[in-house]
Image: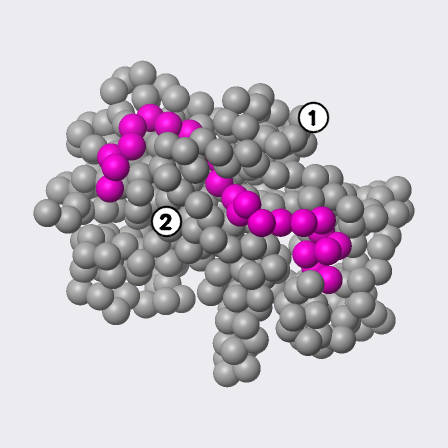
């Protein structure tokens, strides 16, 4: 008998795709988000979407009745510049869900976290045993939320933590909407540093394979770092991507000592959509050792960085032709470019 799954953040890029994909697998889905509707509306009778807030404890209690599994993907993400909002939603919201999950005897709680909890690691690749040292508000909020998960494990709640790199696939926008628009128009693409650093992505399809295996195998109380096994340097992956989509864009490199002070100033004055995580990590290598997931789950990611960038860009190109993309602060919406619009004009 298929289980009942409650998904938070159901209008976001990951949550929305999860809800549709799991419903198509035969699971009964209840999906919650503060947005009035997801960008991919439910097409399966097994999938019910509800507009609501994870901070509404009364609503959470109602939705947990009859639930077997919770997938907590609701998040105020790195694009949000308000620490107060980040902490309230990512920490307080997670605590409410954990408390009610324990009270309702939920069989499995899958928490979607982020590589940002590790900060900038001193040793690569990053393993599940790497010390977590977040350095900015988003990473800190998820770090505290993870610690809440560890506390509730001790109380008997079965919690699986998935730490994700940037996830790509159909519907993924966020900060990438800026890159895609510039590539489409043949504008110069700027890299901070020499581009020799390595950064690992994750396709939604490979991520979904992990979620299915965790549910089917009834995995208990494990942490997994997830990313592709096929990635190169930032410059090589970007150059391959530009060539494959036929863009006329050229890569230009800016020394970190010039770029970072300027981006910090623009961030502090709210003139740039980029924030601390983006410009701090831009010239650093960041990638996971994914062997734990490969061994315990018998999982092998199929898509390379270049593959998933192409898939996501094609979706963007096809959808931006026929409608104006919504602008917001999630990875399912485009981002207000602010002062970067001026840079685009002269690029």
Reply yes or no: does residue 208 show up in magenta. no
Left or right placement of residue 345 versus residue 330 in this view: right
Range covered by the magenta-colored residues: 216-239
Q: Which residue is mark 1?
A: 122
Q: What residue is disc 2 on?
A: 209
Residue 94's place in the image compared with 75, above or below, is above
Contact between labelled residues 1 and 2, with CB atoms less than 8 Å apart? no
Instruction: Give the residue at x 58% y 49%.
Output: 230
Q: Say which residue appears at 50% left-offset and 27% top-offset.
A: 128
**Above or below — where is 12 with respect to 69?**
below
Q: CA distance from mark 2 to mark 1?
A: 30 Å
The numbered mark, 2 or 1, whose residue comes first in the sequence reads: 1
Instruction: Examine the rendering and report whether any part of residue 88 can be seen.
Output: no
- Which quarter shows the C terminus? bottom right
Let me know if residue 227 is in the magenta part. Answer: yes
Residue 191 appears left or right of 36:
right
* Colour theme: one colour
> Which residue: 67% across, 49% down?
232
């Amino acid at each position: 008998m298929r289980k009942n799954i409650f998904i938070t953040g159901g209008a976001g890029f990951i949550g929305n795709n999860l809800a549709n994909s799991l419903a198509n697998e035969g699971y009964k889905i209840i999906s919650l988000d503060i947005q009035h509707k997801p960008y991919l509306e439910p097409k399966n009778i097994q999938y019910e979407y509800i507009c609501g807030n994870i901070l509404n404890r009364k609503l959470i209690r109602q939705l947990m009745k009859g639930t077997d599994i919770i997938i907590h993907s609701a998040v105020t993400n790195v694009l949000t510049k308000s620490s107060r909002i980040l902490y309230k939603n990512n920490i307080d919201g997670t605590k409410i869900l954990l408390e009610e999950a324990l009270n309702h005897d939920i069989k499995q709680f899958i928490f979607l976290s982020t590589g940002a909890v590790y900060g900038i690691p001193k040793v690569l690749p990053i393993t599940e045993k790497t010390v977590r040292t977040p350095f900015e508000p988003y990473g800190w909020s998820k770090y505290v939320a993870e610690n809440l998960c560890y506390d509730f494990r001790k109380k008997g709640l079965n919690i699986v933590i998935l730490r994700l790199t940037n996830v790509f696939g159909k519907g993924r926008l966020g900060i990438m909407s800026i890159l895609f628009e510039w590539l489409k128009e043949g504008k110069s693409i700027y890299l901070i540093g020499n581009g020799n650093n390595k950064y690992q992505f994750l396709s939604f399809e490979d991520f979904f394979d992990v979620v299915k295996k965790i549910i089917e195998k009834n995995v208990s109380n494990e942490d997994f770092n997830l990313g592709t096994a096929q990635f190169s340097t930032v410059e090589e992956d970007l150059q391959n991507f530009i060539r494959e989509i036929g863009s006329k864009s050229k890569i230009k490199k800016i020394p970190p000592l010039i770029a970072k002070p300027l981006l910090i100033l623009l961030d502090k004055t709210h003139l740039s959509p980029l924030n601390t995580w983006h410009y701090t990590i831009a010239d650093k290598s960041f990638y996971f050792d994914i062997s734990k997931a490969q061994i315990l789950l018998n999982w092998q990611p199929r898509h390379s960085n270049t593959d998933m960038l192409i898939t996501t860009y094609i979706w963007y190109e096809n959808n931006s032709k026929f409608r104006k993309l919504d602008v917001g602060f999630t990875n399912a919406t485009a981002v207000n470019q602010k002062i970067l619009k001026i840079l685009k004009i002269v690029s």
